[in-house]
Image (cartoon, helix red, strand yellow):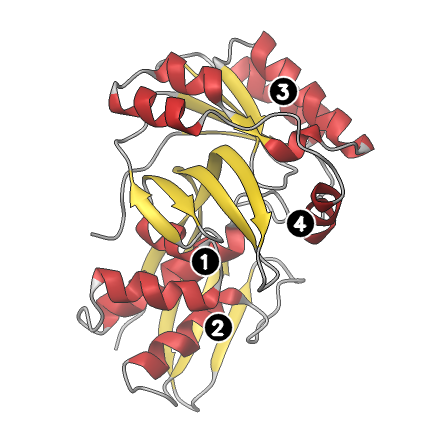
Amino acid sequence: MDTITEKAYAKLNISLDVAERRPDGYHDMVMVMQTISLCDDVAITPADGGRVQVKSNLSFIPGDERNLAARAALRYLAAIGKEGQGLLIRLNKRIPVGAGMAGGSADAAAVLRALNRLYDGALSSDALETLAADVGSDVPFCVRGGTALATGRGEKLRSLPDMPGCEILVCKPDFSISTPELFRRLDGSSMRCHPDTAGILEALDNGDLTGVCRRMYNVFEDLEDRRLRTVKEIKGLLLDAGALGAIMTGTGSAVFGVFSPGAALDSAAETLRKEYGFCEQARCVGRLNR
């Protein structure tokens, strides 16, 4: 069998709300999520020896089951009765690590979609997303892609109308923020505001980009943390550059701004890149798993 390739697309949170902590230790989430064109490249080659191995252009990325891509492959092979099939998974990483953009989950999702093509659609679309939920909370969304409302711990999905046409600028400062740490801080604080999720859904139904952007909100930005001051600085620069809305994605540290279609962003991107290290333009991507 030949090598099969797949794009692993990053995700952004158009909104992020956190509800109660559940008995299983997870939190109930309410999020509007969006796939964007910034992506890693995934290549899978069947191999002898029965081992699933991951190699990456980043030396610190683990090559064993600690990597979600390897875990996804092993779960898929077990689900279709192909345990013992060796695979070499090559990752060319472009999505910044520790950014809140689901880079690891995107890689795992790409592995699942690629293997399902390799094995002639052995799993239905629904079965593939159910399997993805066993790999990680963001993996089902990354398998499906597009614009979606995610609830539960993120695995319950409802596809939404496509995000209206727009340009996106994503900036990540040269630090990451620990997801468990932010959840601990959130548990010990009282949230002042929550996203207007219903308003975002109505704006999407109406194709109203300004209405979506006015309601973009992430509850983690309300926490007291010196690193979030940098997040606010980046948001301010994006808004000054003409963004209709700007927020942090996930638990950070990446921040993105949404601009009108056709906006000229080269100058703003270069300014942010010089100051913070990573800044890339992107566009929305529609549904991937149908």
Above or below 50: residue 174: above
Q: Does the image show residue 93?
A: no
Name the residue tied to disc 2.
Answer: 71
In the image, what residue type sits under mark 3? Answer: Lys
Q: Residues within 10 Å of mark 2 (few under 14, many from 20)?
A: some
Q: Are marks 2 and 1 in contact (CB under 8 Å)?
A: no
Gap in angstroms between the C-alphas marked 2 and 1: 11 Å
* Residue 91 x %, y %: 48, 60
Residue at 36 percent across and 20 percent down: it is: 166
Q: Are marks 4 and 3 in contact (CB under 8 Å)?
A: no
Nearest to viewer (mark 4 / mark 3)? 4
Name the residue tied to disc 4.
Answer: 179
* Residue 105 x %, y %: 48, 56
Gap in angstroms between the C-alphas marked 3 and 2: 35 Å
Gap in angstroms between the C-alphas marked 4 and 3: 20 Å
User: Which structural element holds mark 4?
Assistant: helix
Q: Are marks 4 and 1 in contact (CB under 8 Å)?
A: no
Horizontal placement of 223 versus 42: left or right? right
Q: Quadrant of residue 87?
A: bottom left
Question: Which comes sooner in the sequence, label 4 or label 3?
Answer: 4
Q: Are marks 2 and 4 in contact (CB under 8 Å)?
A: no
Name the residue tied to disc 3.
Answer: 235
User: Which structural element holds mark 2?
Assistant: helix
Question: Which comes sooner in the sequence, label 1 or label 3?
Answer: 1
Horizontal placement of 130 versus 18: left or right? left
In the image, what residue type sits under mark 1? Answer: Asp
Name the residue tied to disc 1.
Answer: 107
